[in-house]
Image (cartoon, rainbow, N blue to C red):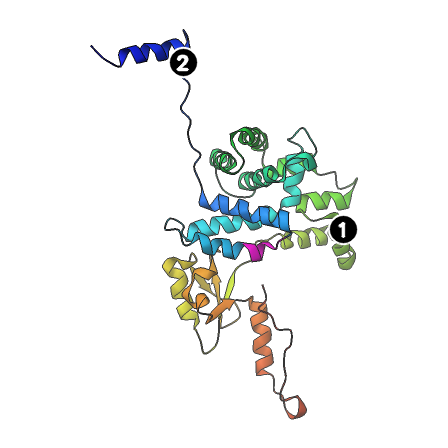
């Protein structure tokens, strides 16, 4: 006789006639890139921290894990900077999909929604993957209850693309030009006003300026003369430390990281023989170093030198 049969009958009786057994609880999957991005957004929100100062230490800690690679770092970086860059636009879209003012949505929940919205509307991640991954993140950092709310909101957002949402949430340009530009280009209204006043001209000029301001900046390295070379940097970037590299356009000491990635992973950056510096800043240093200086101006000191970023 099967000793398990009485237990099985008791279990069947507890479930009641006609009831299907409930699904077993499944632990949420922990995605290191998305958890890291969430932690960075929380730091920006809670402590008014600068994302460019918060993110590198988080990436450095994550790189200690064997399953965290350059692609994970690139994804986390885009999630953080991309979400913050378009925050004003995403807030307007999320607001249209919830039944309360955004100030009444818990900030951690809003951060998760913003990350999900960026994946849906600002990245090339398939819709089902963006929703699923964000809901899993919500389960990890918010709990199952609030994850259901996140799922419901993201499914509403996923019904349309970014252009359709902008037509819906941005006021018509003819009725309120500054607010229209603020929502479409994710800039605070006062910045739109100040830039427009400084620039002058009509709509085309200010739209081009705001669009350019939203472009993802390219990460550029400098091979410090006498300490490293561009060839060494290109070899290191190509080996997977930062997703591949390209020569600079103008500076002979520049290497551009083709896929973003984390420059701190490169050996030359770790030993300070190379660093992050925009090509414009490199050219300024080259111009000053090459300038013929004589007499009392022969010795000079730049007291406010910075790497550019």
Q: Nearer the viewer, residue 110 or 124?
A: 110
Q: Please indicate whether residue 181 sits to the left or right of residue 112 in the image.
A: right
Q: Which label belongs to residue 146? A: none
- Number of numbered discs overlaid on the protein picture: 2
For the C terminus, which image quadrant? bottom right
Label 1 element class? helix
Is 52 part of what is drawn in magenta?
A: yes
> In the rendered image, which residue does mark 1 sit on?
190
Q: Residue at x 40, y 69 (%)?
A: 232
Real-space CA distance between mark 1 and mark 2, rounded to the nearest whole angstrom: 58 Å
Label 1: few (<14), some (14–19) or many (≥20) C-alpha neighbours in 10 Å: few
Earlier-in-chain disc, 1 versus 2: 2
Q: Residue at x 50, y 56 (%)?
A: 57
Percent x, y for residue 252?
A: 49, 73
**Which stretch is magenta?**
49-54
Is 294 part of what is drawn in magenta?
A: no
Per the picture, the main secondary structure of the magenta-coloured stretch is helix
Q: Are marks 1 and 2 in contact (CB under 8 Å)?
A: no
Q: Quadrant of residue 16?
A: top left
Q: Please indicate whether residue 241 sits to the left or right of residue 284 in the image.
A: left
Q: Nearer the viewer, residue 106 or 189?
A: 106
Classify 240 as above or below 105: below
Outermost left residue: 1
Q: Quadrant of residue 280?
A: bottom right
Label 2 element class? loop
Q: Residue at x 63, y 45 (%)?
A: 87
> In the rendered image, which residue does mark 2 sit on?
20
Percent x, y for residue 161?
A: 58, 36
Percent x, y for residue 200?
A: 78, 57
Classify 158 as above or below 212: above
Tell which tag, 1 or 2, sits nearer the viewer.
2
Label 2: few (<14), some (14–19) or many (≥20) C-alpha neighbours in 10 Å: few
């Amino acid at each position: 006789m099967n000793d398990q049969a009485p237990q099985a009958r008791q279990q069947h009786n507890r479930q009641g006639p006609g009831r299907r057994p409930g699904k077993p609880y499944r632990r949420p999957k922990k995605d290191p890139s998305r958890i890291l991005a969430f932690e960075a957004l929380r730091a920006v929100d809670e402590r008014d921290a600068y994302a460019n100062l918060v993110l590198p230490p988080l990436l450095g800690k994550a790189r200690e894990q064997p399953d965290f690679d350059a692609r994970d770092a690139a994804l986390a970086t885009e999630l953080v900077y991309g979400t913050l860059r378009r925050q004003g636009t995403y807030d307007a879209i999320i607001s249209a999909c919830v039944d309360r003012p955004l100030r009444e949505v818990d900030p951690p929940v809003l951060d998760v929604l913003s990350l999900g919205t960026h994946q849906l509307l600002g990245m090339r991640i398939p819709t089902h993957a963006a929703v699923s991954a964000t809901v899993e993140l919500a389960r990890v950092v918010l709990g199952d209850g609030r994850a259901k709310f996140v799922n419901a909101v993201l499914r509403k957002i996923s019904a349309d693309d970014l252009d359709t949402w902008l037509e819906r949430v941005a006021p018509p340009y003819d009725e309120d030009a500054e607010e229209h530009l603020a929502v479409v280009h994710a800039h605070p209204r006062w910045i739109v006003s100040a830039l427009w006043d400084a620039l002058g001209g009509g709509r085309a000029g200010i739209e081009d300026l705001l669009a350019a301001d939203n472009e993802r900046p390219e990460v550029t390295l400098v091979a410090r003369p006498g300490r490293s070379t561009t060839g060494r940097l290109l070899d290191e970037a190509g080996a997977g430390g930062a997703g591949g590299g390209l020569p600079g356009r103008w500076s002979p000491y520049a290497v551009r990281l083709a896929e973003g990635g984390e420059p701190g992973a490169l050996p030359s950056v770790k030993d300070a023989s190379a660093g992050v510096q925009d090509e414009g800043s490199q050219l300024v240093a080259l111009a000053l170093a090459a300038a013929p200086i004589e007499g009392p101006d022969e010795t000079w000191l730049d007291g406010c030198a910075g790497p550019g970023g």
